[in-house]
Amino acid sequence: MLDTQPTTTAAAPALSRPPLAPLLGALFVAAVVAVDPAGLVPSGPARWTVMSIVMGIAVVSLLRQPLRFDRLTGGLWLGLIGWLGLASLAGADPLSAWIGTPDRRLGWIAWCTFPLMFLCGQALDTRRDRRIVFRGAAIAAVALGVWCGLERAGWSLLDESFAGHRVGGPFGQPAYVGAAAVLLVPLAAGVAFDGRESRAWRFVGVIGVVGAAGGLLLSQTRGAWLGVAVALFLVCARHGSAVRKHWREAVFALVTIAALFAVTPLGGRVVDAFDLHHGTTRGRFDDWTVGATVVVHHPLLGVGPEGYRIVFPQYVSASYVRRNGTEVIPDRAHNGVIDVATSGGVVAGLLYGALLVVLFLAAWRSLRTRDPVKLAVGCALIGYIVQQQFLFPLSEVDPLFWIVAGMLFATRSNRSVELRRAPAVVPVLVALCVALAAVTGTREIVADRLLERAARAPAASDLRDADRATRLRPDSIRVWYADARIAARGPALTDVDAAVARVEQGLRRSPRDPALRLLDADLLVERAVRSGLDDDRTRASAVVVNDLAGAPNEPELWIDRGELARLGGDESAEAAARAAAARLQPPPVSNSAPPGEKP
């Protein structure tokens, strides 16, 4: 797949794009280091804004010359994006289906960045271009390793902590660190073992391998570990003679890894994976079951991108709630194919699964070579595909994955490759989208900082910062949610009213968002408790009963219903509601089930 030398024929147009490779290399670095410690969510708005701008500029650069694309994967992508567009029209959350939620940012627009980055990767038709991207990945690997090491030592820019001493790194989530490391370790190794690289860059590659591998271990993400293990196993299978020749070194490496896991908490994570009844593996199976249930009930178009969180309370079982709780409402199915199927139905799941199969087979074929660049690409793709079946597509990392996937198809000799020139107006439209993304992202960064400042304020009497944030990003449900929580900190009844007003503003944007609806119910019950008025109790009761119809296994709603029954003097209804809430309470959380396991 990957050619080692640039193709030079008189008939073929010059497709090398000098500005493109540095942009894609910079994207790898930005995906790791772009954080804003002054924001309420440091790992969110800044990263997505920077990545959106860099990706947009890269696409503009790409569109300046004819596009190279593989027919099979191109057709699968066109089908998937088109089908997800139809699903977005009928999505459970019409706004988020297009722009994404502030947490996952994987609406239809973000989905479009994946095939665009895939095209960018296919444009890297020379070894020089690919080397530039690999260097960016090596720098990103170094940054990831340094960040995770400092966090494990007790210092981090992000105020996050996870049970079991897991590290969330610059992403604020251990699972994200694992996913990024699966991609970056092989690419950094490709730089380290590339005999044509300079000594300085090979040294950077070595540091990147060590650093990103350390982040991979410290994240304690077992899906990522499995991805790396599968990739290494397949490499060994392809190069059995080389393994037999260096069997002593291989045995030493295996013994060292086994000893490391035996004397550190890492071994406990492996053992816990085999506890199918009480360990976190059972929680993953539970997630897959709920996701499959959603697909069964919505087989044609799914529930639209970012719609899973909307219907989750409707389909989750009481046993799931008892085992896993609902402190964090799951918004993804924790399996790449099932997750896409929940967003776009069976057709979308099949199209995405077919894409992954095509990539996996192509990566497997690329492992025949001894070229470290080809081996790095193949290992990175195989490892990432495997780990994604225990996570889901990530707006922060998957663009990098698709760049690497595109490099696998970067060859002119392939008969399935076509060359097409985009209409002249397309780059102009993309440039306008980049400018819009820059303005919108900047406004969100400012809003996020205002929310952080308001959240740290000693009282809720001054809501100017939080309200200004809502004016900057009125489409963001997180902004309205945070604004309401800040307003509710005050002791007066008017503070509760202010909070209710802000929640209702958020519900106008996303009427079925479970977090906003639950907060709305809690606030109305709080108002009824404080005022003691029958009208307030009646209003709160109507909301709670309606919410329970859509989320019958939400323990917080049963607690609210019991409190309302107590206010109304109905002891039997109060006892029944509190008993229902007690039956849904999960067991105490142990260190073997860290809250960061499910991002």
Image: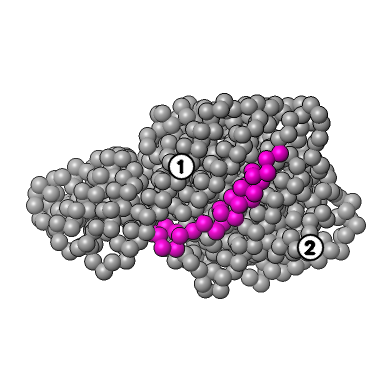
Labels in figure, total:
2
Q: Is residue 197 above or below residue 102?
A: below
Q: Position of residue 528 (x, y in %)?
A: 15, 53
Q: Position of residue 298 (x, y in %)?
A: 45, 30
Q: Which residue is pictured at 29% across the width and 50% down the height?
A: 470
Relative to the observer, which residue lies in front, 12 or 470? 12
Q: Is residue 349 above or below residue 381?
A: above
| Magenta segment boundaries in residue numbering | 16-42
Q: Is residue 533 above or below residue 204?
A: above
Q: Amino acid at mark 1?
A: Ala
Q: Does residue 413 appear anywhere in the picture?
A: yes
Q: Which residue is mark 1?
A: 435
Q: Is residue 31 magenta?
A: yes
Relative to the observer, which residue lies in front, 503 or 217? 503
Q: Label 2: how many residues lie within 10 Å, few (<14), some (14-19) or many (20+)?
A: few
- The answer to which quarter of the image holds residue 303 is top left
Q: Amino acid at mark 2?
A: Arg
Q: Which residue is pictured at 43% across the width and 41% down the height?
A: 436
Q: Position of residue 67 (x, y in %)?
A: 65, 31
Disc number placed over residue 199 in the picture, else none: 2
Sooner in the amino-acid sequence: mark 1 or mark 2: 2
- The answer to which quarter of the image holds residue 174 is bottom right
Disc number placed over residue 212 in the picture, else none: none
